[in-house]
């Protein structure tokens, strides 16, 4: 089966190309806001008919006219951009007669039409998430209604699909004499700073198929993210398939604040210990100094905008440093272990504690778990999520005694029953590994998913094995990095049919 991943390159555009990129980003923002305005106007018209107690046929017709799905939003925007409401001009003849000429959106031909369509698609996804959250079909925190996007000089993005016409594709990588370049519709060939050899080789040999490209205006430069559908990794770099009755080999991964990751087996053998980078705390002094500089500038002035840009650049460096560190840790875990078990941490609840919020956010536990999940799936490994109420830190990994008086400042676990003295985090990792082995054995024996069996040290509550998929939730992106694809067998990536888009929901 195929997998989706992305390749992110830093663009090196010319002055003219920077203007064109900014024009496309502004067009995407404009199309998103206009589609939202058309949607809200149609809903208000529907409510007005209901308040006037119009006939059933008129109410049903007005309800059908409210654009919700991606196709209806695209059609509504296409109809508007050619209408008189989008643009018109008055022509005066020689004899004084005034005529009205409908021009529509005058500048729509300067940008690619895909930018408008993808903006409508983004709005349809936001409306679908909002309706699903209101009806209870979407789990997690409530999703708010889509809002209008504000104009910004340091942010913005747009997306383009790859359309194949004959043997040529609209999005190409490394064309012509410039191998470090990306060719986009309407924008032409734009040079990039990184080497594109791996992606070019995969596309040329048929091991990857370009799906779309997302261009983002960052704080310091422009970026392009090419989403591709690639073949599976070579069996050499994948983990070997275990026997059906094999319940061993689990490694517990305990995430903390002092030590970001402590991995250990059931017998208490430590396999990995990585300290937390704490990049946010390290740059906190500089961040405060830059923030004070912003507060001293006059609102709306050029100096204030420059000072705010310096703060944004600092946050960008912190984020890039943390992401690079997390990828190194996750790669080390999935390359050396085929079976990993993680804790189901209530990160949102922990972040509500004002004394721990900054440290927990700096550790990025959720992002680390997301990377481990999709990278382990690429390598044919297994990831299990332990029950949230399992007391991994308070349970003795040797005899199973529960110590309820253990506090956060106790960094060494001492068992009063068997006399075990072990590092707190390593003890929790050993308990997680034992929990995974016991749960796997119970499932193989046909036991109930929530029942306690021999070796299963689950305290109470259901087992949660559902992990967040790639690219969902805030502050997340699909496939941050791609593992080394060298040696992957040549095979054409499977082309999955896109599901039909139905009407997502209606506002009561």
Image (spheres, grey):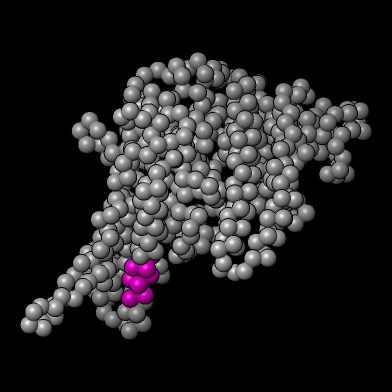
Residue lying at 54% horizontally and 53% vertically, measured from the top left: 139
Q: Quadrant of the C terminus?
A: bottom left
Please state the extent of the stretch shown in magenta in the rendering. Answer: 36-45
Give percent across and percent down for residue 205.
34, 21
- Count of marks placed on residues: 0
Give percent across and percent down for residue 161.
33, 43
Q: Nearer the viewer, residue 108 or 66?
A: 108
**Residue 218 visible in rendering:** yes
Give percent across and percent down for residue 355.
78, 54
Q: Is residue 333 above or below residue 53?
A: above
Residue lying at 7% horizontally and 82% vertically, measured from the top left: 95
User: Which secondary structure is most common in the magenta stretch?
Assistant: helix
Picture quadrant of residue 307: bottom right
Q: Residue furthest left?
A: 95
Q: Is residue 395 above or below residue 98?
A: above
- Left or right: 258 in relation to 324: right
């Amino acid at each position: 089966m195929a997998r989706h991943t992305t390749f992110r390159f830093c663009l090196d555009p010319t002055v003219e190309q920077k203007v064109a990129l900014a024009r496309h980003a502004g067009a995407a923002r404009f199309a998103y806001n206009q589609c939202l305005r058309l949607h809200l106007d149609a809903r208000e018209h529907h409510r007005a008919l209901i308040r006037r107690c119009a006939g059933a046929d008129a109410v049903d017709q007005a309800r059908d006219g409210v654009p919700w799905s991606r196709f209806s939003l695209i059609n509504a925007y296409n109809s508007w951009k050619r209408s008189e409401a989008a643009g018109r001009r008055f022509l005066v003849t020689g004899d004084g007669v005034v005529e009205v000429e409908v021009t529509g959106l005058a500048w729509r031909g300067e940008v690619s039409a895909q930018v408008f369509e993808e903006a409508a698609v983004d709005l349809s996804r936001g409306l679908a998430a909002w309706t699903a959250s209101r009806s209870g079909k979407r789990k997690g925190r409530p999703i708010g209604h889509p809002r209008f996007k504000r104009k910004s000089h340091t942010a913005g993005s747009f997306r383009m699909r790859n359309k194949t016409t004959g043997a040529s594709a609209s999005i190409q990588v490394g064309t012509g004499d410039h191998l470090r370049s990306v060719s986009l519709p309407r924008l032409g060939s734009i040079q990039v700073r990184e080497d594109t050899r791996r992606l070019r080789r995969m596309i040329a040999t048929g091991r990857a198929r370009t799906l779309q490209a997302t261009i983002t205006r960052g704080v310091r430069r422009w970026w392009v993210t090419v989403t591709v559908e690639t073949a599976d990794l070579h069996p050499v770099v994948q983990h070997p398939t275990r026997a059906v009755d094999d319940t061993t080999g689990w490694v517990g991964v305990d995430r903390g604040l002092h030590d970001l990751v402590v991995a250990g087996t059931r017998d208490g053998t430590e396999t990995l210990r990585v300290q937390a980078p704490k990049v946010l705390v390290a740059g906190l002094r500089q961040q405060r100094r830059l923030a004070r500089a912003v507060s001293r500038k006059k609102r709306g002035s050029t100096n204030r905008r420059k000072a705010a840009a310096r703060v944004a650049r600092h946050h960008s460096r912190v984020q890039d440093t943390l992401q690079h560190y997390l990828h190194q840790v996750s790669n080390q875990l999935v390359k050396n272990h085929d079976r990993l078990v993680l804790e189901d941490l209530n990160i949102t609840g922990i972040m509500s504690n004002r004394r721990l919020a900054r440290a927990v956010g700096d550790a990025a536990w959720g992002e680390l778990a997301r990377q481990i999940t999709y990278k382990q799936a690429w390598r044919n490994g297994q990831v299990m999520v332990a029950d949230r109420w399992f007391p991994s830190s308070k349970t003795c990994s040797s005899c199973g005694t529960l110590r309820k008086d253990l506090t956060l400042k106790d960094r060494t676990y001492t068992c009063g029953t068997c006399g075990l003295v072990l590092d707190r985090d390593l003890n929790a990792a050993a308990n997680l590994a034992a929990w995974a082995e016991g749960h796997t054995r119970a499932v193989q024996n046909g036991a109930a998913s929530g029942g306690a069996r021999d070796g299963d040290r689950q305290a109470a509550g259901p087992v949660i094995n559902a992990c967040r998929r790639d690219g969902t939730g805030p502050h997340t992106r699909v496939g941050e990095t791609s593992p080394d694809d060298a040696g992957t067998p040549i095979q054409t990536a499977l082309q999955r049919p896109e599901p039909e888009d139905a009407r997502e929901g209606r506002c009561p």
